[in-house]
Image: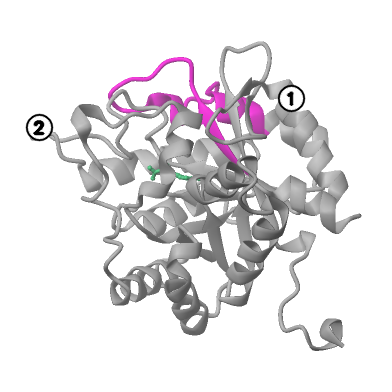
Amino acid sequence: MRRLVAETRLGVDDLLAPLFVREGIDRPAPIASLPGQVQHTVASLVAEARRLAALGVPGIALFGVPAAKDPVGSGAWDPDGIVQMALAELRAAIGDDMVLIADLCLDEYTEHGHCGVLDASGSVDNDATVALYRRVAIAQARAGADVVAPSGMMDGQVASIRAALDGVGCGEVAVLAYAAKYASALYGPFRDAVGVEIASGGDRRGYQQDPANRREARIEVALDVAEGADIVMVKPALAYLDVLADTAAAVDVPVAAYHVSGEYAMVKAAAERGWIDGDAVMVEHLTSIKRAGARMILTYAAGEVAQAVNG
Ligand code: PBG
């Protein structure tokens, strides 16, 4: 009876796995604050993508860790940059079995760790940054990305990237917009994973949203949809289920939620201490995210949940 009346069913089709690929390492490097996750070599990334595809996970979201950084983050659009190299290998290895999503941002590639380039005063320059995002989008599309996912929260980024892609004949590449992305303390383990430290104790409050604001997210989401976003994402997920529910009610494009690094790590840490049943809590959390309105969930637990669902 419970199965018959269940309103929400979490399945493998709901999951996207974020994966990290690091330039210049010869074996995968575990990420201490993300138990079970690693910085991949290109070879181990391809093997993991194959494993996830075999489990039925429909897509992966790729983050790059370059060997060198510079003030403008040029590794992000270098045709030989780590993500572009990895995308080409993934495409060759897995064909159309999986959706390849490329995170589109500069923070992993800039020395100062901000999501954009800085002006003379040291603030992120919105429009100069968006001009660089266009280059990243084109490089990722040409390398084989099905979807680019701008995560930098610059104003106008979606329209500009859409136009750039269309202008080079990549009109079929979709845009997954990090539409309502909050300046959250839950990204800590991710920053370990990608080796990002924001210069001089800085933060992202100048471009990411204030956790105090719910209505503001509606504006951000509506703008991204109007600019041509194919999918809109809310991030983080659990602490923002109200925003997620609002978003799902307001738009007709698919809604994604990012179950971020800190959300995953908290469950793992408590489970490690024997304080909670980690597997059960993980599924409960992901089910709640889906119940609130997410059509798809980016989660570091994608592999383990897919395995459990498959029996
Ligand atoms: C920025 C980016 C971040 C995450 C995804 N893209 C970090 C940030 O905004 O500081 C965080 C994801 C996570 O915590 O799992 N390019």
Find out whether residue 66 is within the magenta segment. yes
Q: Can residue 100 be seen at all in this image of the molecule?
A: no
Residue pointed to by mark 1: 44
Q: Is residue 191 above or below residue 70?
A: below
Of badges 2 and 1, the one in the foreground is 1
| Image position of 33 with respect to 290: above or below | above
Question: Which percent across, then down, holds residue 93?
Answer: 81, 32
Residue under the image location 41 percent in, 39 percent down: 188
Q: Amino acid at mark 1?
A: Ser
Label 2 or label 1, whichever comes before in sequence order: 1
Instruction: Classify mark 1 as within 8 Å of ligand 1 or not, answering yes or no.
Output: no
Residue at the image point whose x is 43% and y is 51% from the top: 161
Question: Looking at the image, in which quadrant does ligand 1 appear?
Answer: top left
| Extent of the magenta region | 61-87
Task: State the image coordinates of residue 7 (x, y, percent, origin top left).
Answer: 72, 84
Q: Is residue 47 magenta?
A: no
Give the residue drawn at x 43%, y 26%. 195
Could you tell me how far apart the alpha carbons at marks 2 and 1 are, in whole angstroms?
A: 41 Å
In front of the other: 135 or 271: 271
Q: Amino acid at mark 2?
A: Ala
Q: Which residue is mark 2?
A: 120
